Image (cartoon, helix red, strand yellow):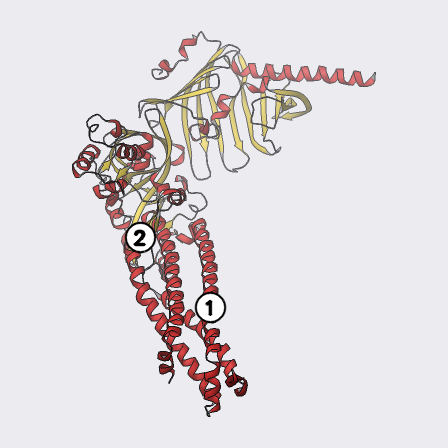
């Protein structure tokens, strides 16, 4: 009977279903965006550089200097890799230096790495730059006859910028179509050599924004000055073997990768490490805790500390936390609006059908049965609405998870200043999606209290009179 | 009338204190020029190391330092002209001007900051001096002199105490305070000896107040005063050639 009631007034049913449908759709899509950007933030900062867990000297957390380093025991990486859930481990020596080329000097982060281990870890090799737009390309005479002003302007704005592949370079022209021949010419003029370092190299790989700032190209030499282990002086000239474009702009501004042994001799810290960074397969909070505990047990004999990224990077944790709270508040507001949308249609429905209810009760239908029928109607509509919401929402989520929205303009700049990639990806399907559905159904049930009460208190005579 | 008398004595005493500081400063600086060989020991809770260097200076404006050991540091040289400093590093074959951001960093990893080396002169001209007591240090009778910076002086210290021996005008102890009147570091001098016709302390120790256990000890191995040296010796060109 509930089902037949629904078909009797198709328009009313459609309105209720669509209000539920939009509620689910909005809630799911919005939450997915929120969760997606948190996980991107974490991935960006943690997987590509920081590591979910770090093994380090007990004093390193308070004073991350070369004095708080530890002796590199070659068997340590294997010991750590044997712990379940550990995906990759990489030994590093980290120090700060002044890097200069010509008259320009800048403070840089020197990361002594084992290239093979790092490849399994953050894989900086994938960011090796293949194209850099020369600073004077826009004015170069070779291209002059065929370049339009608009293309010149774009080239000028992106002068010095580096790209890992030709497709990314082509993307700067965005909606401005460029002839294939012209693009090829630009690509040819922008092409750069370069590769990632290997353990035996005596050169460095630097990040693209740093290279741009110091005006350095592959093959040039980089002068570095610093203070080494135990007050020794550290100075060296190193050829630049390659340039990498690190997605995180903060790191891209100041990163110098060096083979571990070279970094150790540069800073006079022979066979010393700052820390071992560990990446995990499963990085959820529970898995992180379990793995940290078992690492602590396994490494107790070394006297080293095992710290999670949350312990070490309070700022990022707080940033994510506060963002999550404001996201939840916003979601709550959305629910509020949605609830009154549903509630409104329910009130309308009750008023329209008052007469009908009255007649039904008059011919002998029990009020409680009538209330249950109405409840069933609402539930059926809620289920259809939620199902439809999922049906439309999930493909959207999936699409934007695979092809994240790339922000442009001021918003992108702001995000990049904060050290994040200007992307708005969505989280993949997860338990949060089900929660959105549940909460919408819960709201529908809440909205049903009104018609149920109305029916139970129904005065048959006044209802029929109308 | 009495007030006038008091201020007059204060004036005299003030003059006197400035005179003491000026004389003490000259005792160490060799009036016109000097050449010295020193060893510096840097002591940290977990390690210590030594550096040896030669140093030439002329007046208060010019000085040049050449590191002779250990092997890793040998050949580095530092040139100071007025309030600017350059360093030469043979490893990178380059002269680097000290950026302002490195003023407060330790020189060669020691407790002496680059700023200490650059702005020595200021104890005479940049401060007002008053005698604030008399004490014994290592058995020597000393004046305790309080230095407060002149209003527009470009100095980093909020206050200084110097203990100067009455007999030889030698500074045996100095305390440096920041603007909040908190002790930053203490410098001690001892092992007074006759060197090149003068009586001077030959060992200097520096204790930073913030880091207990840290200490830098400089020992004077040889010193010559009023040597014949040309201004052109203190040049960027000579910085890369000095031995």
Q: Is residue B81 above or below residue A250?
A: above
The answer, for residue B15, to whether it is visible in the render is yes
Marked residue chain, label 2:
A
In the rendered image, the residue lying farthest to the left is: A181
Residue to which mark 2 is pinned: A404
Q: Residue at 40% across / 65% down in the picture?
A: A23
User: Left of A211 or right of it: where is B113?
Assistant: right
Chain for mark 1? A
Q: Could you say which is closer to the camera, residue B193 or residue A377?
A: A377
Indicate the position of residue B18 as horizontal and vertical percent values.
64, 16
The correct choice, above or below, for A209 with respect to A351 in the image is above
Q: Secondary structure at mark 2?
A: loop
For the residue labelled by badge 1, is the local secondary structure a helix, a strand or a loop?
helix
Marks 1 and 2, how far apart in space? 30 Å
Q: Are marks 1 and 2 on the same chain?
A: yes
Q: Name the disc covering residue A339, or none.
A: 1
């Amino acid at each position: 009977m509930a089902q037949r009631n629904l078909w009797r007034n198709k328009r009313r049913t459609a309105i209720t279903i669509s209000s539920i449908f939009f509620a689910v759709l909005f809630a799911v899509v919005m939450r997915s965006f929120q969760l997606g950007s948190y996980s991107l933030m974490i991935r960006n900062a943690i997987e590509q550089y920081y590591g979910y867990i770090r093994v380090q000297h007990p004093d390193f957390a308070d004073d991350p200097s070369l004095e708080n380093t530890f002796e590199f025991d070659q068997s340590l990486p294997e010991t750590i890799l044997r712990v379940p859930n550990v995906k990759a481990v990489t030994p590093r020596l980290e120090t700060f230096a002044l890097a200069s080329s010509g008259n320009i000097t800048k403070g840089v982060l020197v990361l002594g790495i084992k290239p093979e281990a790092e490849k399994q870890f953050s894989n900086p090799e994938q960011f090796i730059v293949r194209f850099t737009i020369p600073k004077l390309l826009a004015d170069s005479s070779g291209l002059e006859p065929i370049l339009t002003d608009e293309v010149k302007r774009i080239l000028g704005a992106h002068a010095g910028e580096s790209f890992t592949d030709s497709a990314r370079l082509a993307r700067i022209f965005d909606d401005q179509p460029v002839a294939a021949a012209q693009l090829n010419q630009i690509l040819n003029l922008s092409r750069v050599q370069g590769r990632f370092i290997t353990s035996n190299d005596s050169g460095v790989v630097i990040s693209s924004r740093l290279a741009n700032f110091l005006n350095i190209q592959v093959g040039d030499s980089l002068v570095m000055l610093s203070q080494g282990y135990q007050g020794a002086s550290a100075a060296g000239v190193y050829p630049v073997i390659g340039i990498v474009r690190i997605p995180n702009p903060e790191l891209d501004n100041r990163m110098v990768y060096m083979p571990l042994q070279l970094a150790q001799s540069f800073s006079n810290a022979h066979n010393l490490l700052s820390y071992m960074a560990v990446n995990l397969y499963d990085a959820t909070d529970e898995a992180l805790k379990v793995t940290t505990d078992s690492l602590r047990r396994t490494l107790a004999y070394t006297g080293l500390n095992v710290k999670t990224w949350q312990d070490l990077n309070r700022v990022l944790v707080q940033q994510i936390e506060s963002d999550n709270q404001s996201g939840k508040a916003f979601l709550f507001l959305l629910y509020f609006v949605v609830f009154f949308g549903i509630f409104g249609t329910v009130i309308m429905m009750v008023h329209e059908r008052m007469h009908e209810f009255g007649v039904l009760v008059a011919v002998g239908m029990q009020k409680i049965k009538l209330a249950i029928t109405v409840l069933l109607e609402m539930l059926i509509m809620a289920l259809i609405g939620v199902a439809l919401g999922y049906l439309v929402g999930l493909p959207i989520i999936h699409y934007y998870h695979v092809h994240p929205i790339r922000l442009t303009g001021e918003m992108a700049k702001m995000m990049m200043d904060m050290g994040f990639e200007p992307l708005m990806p969505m989280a993949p399907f997860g338990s949060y999606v089900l929660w959105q559905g549940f909460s919408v159904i819960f709201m529908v049930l809440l909205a049903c209290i009104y018609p149920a009460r109305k029916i139970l208190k129904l005065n048959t005579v006044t209802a029929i009179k109308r | 009338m009495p007030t006038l008398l008091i201020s007059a004595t204060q004036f005299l005493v003030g003059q006197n204190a400035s005179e003491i500081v000026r004389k003490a400063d000259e005792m160490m600086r060799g009036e016109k020029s000097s050449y010295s060989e020193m060893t510096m020991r840097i002591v940290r809770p977990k390690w210590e190391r030594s550096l040896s260097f030669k140093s030439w200076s002329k007046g208060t404006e010019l000085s040049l330092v050449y590191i002779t050991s250990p092997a890793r540091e040998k050949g580095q040289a530092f040139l100071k002209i007025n309030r600017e400093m350059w360093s030469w590093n043979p490893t990178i074959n380059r002269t680097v001007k000290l950026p302002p951001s490195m003023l407060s960093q330790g020189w060669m990893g020691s407790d002496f900051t680059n700023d200490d080396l650059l702005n020595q002169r200021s104890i005479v001209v940049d401060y007002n001096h008053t005698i604030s007591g008399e004490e014994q240090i290592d058995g020597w009778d000393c004046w305790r002199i309080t230095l407060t910076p002149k209003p527009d002086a470009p100095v980093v210290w909020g206050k200084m105490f110097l203990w100067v021996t009455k007999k030889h005008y030698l500074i045996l102890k100095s305390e440096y305070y920041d603007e909040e009147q908190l002790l930053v570091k203490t410098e001690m001098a001892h092992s007074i000896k006759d060197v090149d016709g003068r009586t001077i302390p030959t060992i200097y120790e520096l204790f930073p107040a913030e880091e207990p256990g840290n200490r830098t000890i400089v020992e004077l191995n040889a010193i010559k005063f009023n040597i014949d040296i040309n201004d052109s010796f203190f040049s960027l060109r000579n910085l890369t050639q000095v031995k």
